[in-house]
């Protein structure tokens, strides 16, 4: 895979299985019903614009106009699908795992923006927190402390209570990023 900005690379790692499934369904009509179910589930999770773009791609549109109106994350996913249809070698590897530390700067920036009153950042974090809670484990705990982070809580011991090593590391990375942002 070509060198990508860290955020795009992280998005591809997180959504690799979904991207592969969509591309496989696009080139194998026998998987269409399975794809339709996955797209309905994605739409129910708030991915309406991305699902709309994927449906356009499924109808044969391959130009970049299908990317119009997509946010950055959705655009990276749709571009990967388009590229994967043309050349499956461009698909993200299925065996790569997202790097927990790579999420910290983005989460910290969103937490800081929400704390300053940015309604979009607050809504995005609320949506993320809801998804994290559904995921369970350390992600559920992180989702559960999101509001406290927005409200200014910075006590690492309190925030990481009950978390495993990776969850604790991610929270500490977020706190470190928040501390850096407050110095500027």
Image (cartoon, helix red, strand yellow):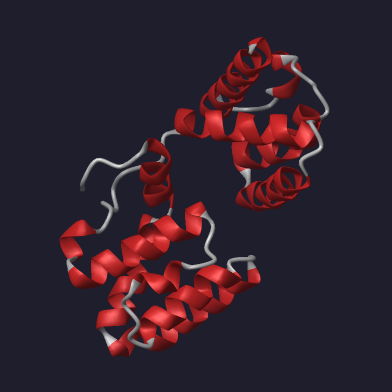
User: Could you say which quadrant of the image residue 80 lies in?
Assistant: bottom left
Q: Position of residue 156 (x, y in %)?
A: 69, 15
Pick the residue in front: 120 or 77. Answer: 120
Q: Looking at the image, which residue sits at the far top? A: 183
Q: Which residue is drawn at 37% across and 79% down?
A: 57
Q: Position of residue 116 (x, y in %)?
A: 79, 31
- Left or right for 44, reference 154: left
Q: Where is residue 61 in the image (x, y as percent from the top left)?
A: 35, 82
User: Could you say which quadrant of the image residue 25 lies in?
Assistant: bottom left
Pick the residue in front: 53 or 103. Answer: 53
- Left or right for 178, reference 56: right
Q: How many marks?
A: 0
Pick the residue in front: 117 or 9. Answer: 117
Pick the residue in front: 118 or 145. Answer: 118
Q: Residue at x 59, y 19 (%)?
A: 172
Q: Where is residue 161 in the image (x, y as percent from the top left)?
A: 71, 23
Query: Looking at the picture, does residue 19 appear above or below residue 55?
Result: above
Q: Residue at x 40, y 65 (%)?
A: 78
Q: Quadrant of the C terminus?
A: top right
């Amino acid at each position: 895979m070509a060198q990508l900005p860290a955020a795009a690379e992280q998005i591809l790692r997180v959504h690799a299985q979904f991207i592969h499934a969509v591309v496989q369904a696009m080139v194998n009509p026998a998987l269409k019903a399975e794809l339709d179910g996955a797209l309905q589930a994605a739409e129910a999770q708030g991915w309406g614009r991305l699902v709309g773009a994927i449906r356009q791609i499924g109808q044969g549109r391959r130009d970049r106009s299908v990317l119009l109106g997509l946010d950055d994350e959705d655009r990276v996913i749709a571009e990967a699908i388009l590229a994967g249809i043309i050349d499956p070698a461009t698909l993200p590897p299925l065996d790569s795992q997202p790097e927990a530390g790579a999420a910290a700067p983005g989460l910290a920036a969103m937490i800081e923006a929400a704390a300053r009153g940015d309604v979009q950042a607050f809504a995005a974090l609320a949506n993320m927190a809801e998804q994290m809670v559904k995921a369970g484990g350390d992600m559920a705990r992180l989702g559960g402390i999101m509001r406290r982070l927005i409200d200014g809580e910075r006590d690492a011991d309190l925030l990481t209570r009950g978390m495993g090593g990776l969850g604790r590391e991610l929270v500490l990375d977020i706190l470190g990023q928040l501390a850096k942002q407050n110095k500027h």
